[in-house]
Structure formats: C-alpha cells, structure tokens
Image: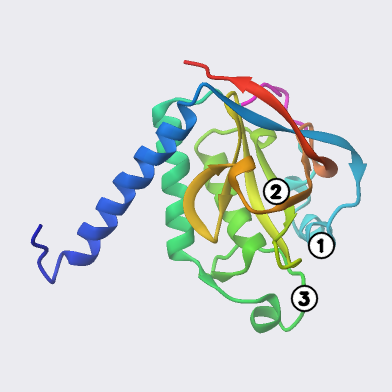
Amino acid sequence: MTVSRSAGGSTLRNIAMLGLLAVAWNVTDAVASASMVTGGLTSQPIGHYDFCKLHPGECNIHPGDLQPLKVSKAVWHEIVKVNDAVNRNVKPMSDYDHYGKDEVWAYPDDGFGDCEDYVLEKRRELMREGISLSDLLITVVKKKDGEGHAVLTVRTSRGDYILDNLTNEVKPWTSTPYRYLKRQATDDTGRWVTIREGQTTLVGAVD
C-alpha cells in the first residue's frame, strides 16, 4: 500500500485502530471469559482518598443497576477507541515531576499524567457515554517487577476486561501479566474491595 507523506500518520493510525477493534470484538465473542472474585472491604488508596476530598461527588455514588455491562459490537468499539485515544493524547509524567509530590490522582486536563490519571480519564469518558460507574472500576495491581500500577476494569456480561496505558489492546484480565490486589466496589464509588488471587467466575457469552 502506498501512503502519502501528508496523510501517512492518520492513515496508519486508522489501520491500527481497525485492527484493535477487530481484536477487541473477537475477544469478547469467545464462548466464555472470566470475572474477578472480590473479597471484603479493604483500604482506600491514599491517592484516591485525596482525589475524593477534591471531588466528593465522584466518591459517594451508589449505582442502582449492578448488572454487568451487556456488551455489543458498538459498545466494545467505543471502549477500544477511548482506550486508544487517551493513551495517545495523554503524555506520561510521574507525579513528582508533574506536581512535586507522590501519589496525586487527578484528571490529566493539561495532557500529562501517570497510570492513575489515565484510568480516571478513561472512566470519565466512558461514563459520559452512558456506562455505569459500577462497571468502570479503578483497580490496583502489581507488575512483575513489583511496582504498583493502576488499570481500569470494565465489568461486562462476558467477563472483566482491562484498559491499560501500557497497551492499546483491551484484554481479559486473566490475559494480563499483573497480580491483582484491589478495586473499587461495584456498589459504592468511595469504597474498595480485595481481589481474590487466582479465583475467577466463568461467564458465558451473551448476544
């Protein structure tokens, strides 16, 4: 394929996006996926605690409909597009370099942020698309090197999927290299629950 110099960047981006959309839908079209099994209440991350003091309305929501998001091709395309757009538009910067201190959770309105800020922005944009906060859960994990990391769990009728600033591919949580520690509770945006390591609930595919 010949790509002109002026349109090359956008053309390649569109080709990559089509590939991501296809991968995302093929993944969700599997016969069964897995949902995390959560435990009891646990400590709220300090960054989220401070975020809630600045945005109290974000942290006292009790979603009424706790049924997992029913997926469709259109919904998954929107999820993949949001993941890709935020990853592309927000530039990585540590909290210390950004704010002069550690563990600041904030919306990346100036175009810079760390992993928690990517998560907050994806959550905000998907919430604007009508997805319930009970299905958009900030999640704390550990990477293989032991470093803490934050991702967004999208809770669906086909299982739990992860939006991550380290990849543009939306993956089942069981296909990521992380150890899962805790996430927001589905019924209270200000509370956190543990994730039972190694335990999953199989979810059948839904039309």
Disc 3/disc 1 C-alpha distance (Å) = 12 Å
Q: Mark 3 belongs to which amino acid?
A: Asp
Task: Using a 10 Å C-alpha cutoff, classify the residue at mark 2 as few (fewer than 14 neighbours), some (14 to 19) or many (20 or more).
Answer: many
Q: In the image, is 163 to the left or to the right of 65?
A: left
For image coordinates 79% across by 63% down, the residue present is: 47
For image coordinates 47% across by 15% down, the residue present is: 207
Task: Please name the residue that numbered disc 1 is placed on.
Answer: 50
Q: Earlier in the sequence, mark 3 or mark 1?
A: 1
Q: Are marks 3 and 1 in contact (CB under 8 Å)?
A: no
Q: Mark 1 belongs to which amino acid?
A: Asp
Assign the N terminus to one quadrant of the image.
bottom left
For image coordinates 72% across by 84% down, the residue present is: 100
Task: Using a 10 Å C-alpha cutoff, classify the residue at mark 1 as few (fewer than 14 neighbours), some (14 to 19) or many (20 or more).
Answer: some
Give the secondary structure at mark 2: strand
Q: Quadrant of residue 94?
A: bottom right
Give the secondary structure at mark 1: helix
For image coordinates 32% across by 46% down, the residue present is: 19
Q: Are marks 2 and 1 in contact (CB under 8 Å)?
A: no
Query: Which of the labelled discs sits on residue 138, or is there none?
Result: 2
Task: Please name the residue that numbered disc 3 is placed on.
Answer: 102
